[in-house]
Image: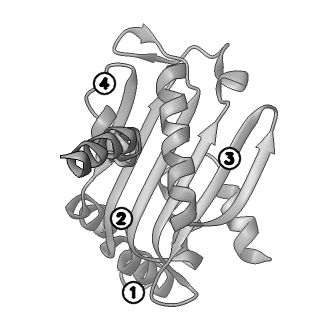
């Protein structure tokens, strides 16, 4: 009986850690204070075939990379509480990821993480975390569904067999802010 009580207490103490490990994207996908985007592999395959000359070697590399993506998810929020939760989730993931680079500019912190893939040029996960956006977006007139939106935090997760040398090309094609920093990093 005493052992069961100890196990019960340990389970209660570990409960906050297990809830933090919950996928942050699933947790907030239906929250009205969050803009949630999830692009499935089939959509990437369709995008890869649009307006690209398949005889061009660079275009073929892009098509191959896009076809290897298994998941692309984004959360954007201006809610401080959710931003804090997203930040805690990213912190909990840091041990499993390698920090690729960090950019700090005008109160905005942008950090790129990767998880090693099959070789040095490939990653199985790419995570971009941007925090502090309200410092530069507070005066912008961004409206979604007729409501003014402010942004504080963005987290982008990309999984698959991703060629790190091609990631900046993908982020540029998708108009993701900060992709120019990745391109500079890869050229060093």
Decide: few, some or many residues near mark 1? Use Cα within 10 Å; few <14, some 14-19, many ≥20. few
| 20 on left or right of 9 | right
Contact between labelled residues 1 and 4, with CB atoms less than 8 Å apart: no
Counting residues from the start of the chain, the first of labels 3 and 2 encountered is: 2
Residue at the spot of label 3: 110
Q: Is residue 174 above or below residue 163?
A: above
Per the model, the C-alpha gap separating discs 4 and 3 is: 23 Å
The nearer-to-camera label among 3 and 2 is: 3
Per the model, the C-alpha gap separating discs 2 and 4 is: 35 Å
Q: Which quadrant of the figure has residue 147? A: top left
**How far across and down, in percent of the image, does residue 72 sit?**
36, 56
Front-most of 160 and 17?
A: 17
Residue at the spot of label 2: 51
Q: Is residue 53 above or below residue 47?
A: below
Q: Is residue 87 above or below residue 34?
A: below
Q: Residue at x 31, y 46 (%)?
A: 6
Counting residues from the start of the chain, the first of labels 3 and 1 encountered is: 1
Residue located farthest toward the front when viewing the structure as drawn:
2
The answer, for residue 176, to whether it is visible in the render is no
Instruction: Look at the numbered disc 4 and give the secondary structure of its residue.
Output: loop
Q: Residue at x 57, y 58 (%)?
A: 94
Q: Is residue 128 above or below residue 64?
A: above
**How far across and down, in percent of the image, does residue 120 sit?**
58, 88
Residue at the spot of label 4: 31
Decide: few, some or many residues near mark 4? Use Cα within 10 Å; few <14, some 14-19, many ≥20. few
The answer, for residue 186, to whether it is visible in the render is yes
Front-most of 75 and 10?
A: 10
Residue at the spot of label 1: 55
The nearer-to-camera label among 3 and 1 is: 3
The colour mode here is one colour
Decide: few, some or many residues near mark 2? Use Cα within 10 Å; few <14, some 14-19, many ≥20. few
């Amino acid at each position: 009986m005493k052992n069961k009580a100890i196990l019960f207490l340990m389970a209660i103490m570990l409960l906050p850690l297990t809830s933090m490990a919950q996928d942050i994207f699933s947790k907030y996908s239906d929250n009205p204070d969050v803009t949630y985007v999830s692009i499935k592999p089939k959509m990437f395959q369709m995008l890869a075939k649009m307006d690209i000359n398949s005889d061009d070697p660079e275009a073929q590399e892009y098509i191959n990379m896009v076809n290897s993506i298994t998941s692309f998810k984004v959360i954007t929020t201006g809610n401080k509480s959710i931003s804090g939760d997203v930040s805690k989730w990213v912190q909990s993931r840091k041990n499993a990821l390698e920090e690729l680079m960090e950019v700090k500019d005008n109160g905005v912190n942008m950090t790129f993480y990767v998880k090693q893939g099959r070789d040095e040029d490939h990653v199985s996960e790419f995570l971009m975390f941007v925090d502090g956006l309200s410092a530069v977006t507070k005066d912008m007139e961004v409206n979604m569904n007729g409501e003014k939106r402010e942004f504080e935090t963005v987290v982008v997760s990309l999984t698959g067999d991703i060629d790190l040398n091609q990631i900046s090309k993908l982020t540029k094609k998708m108009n993701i802010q900060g992709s120019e920093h990745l391109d500079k990093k890869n050229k060093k």
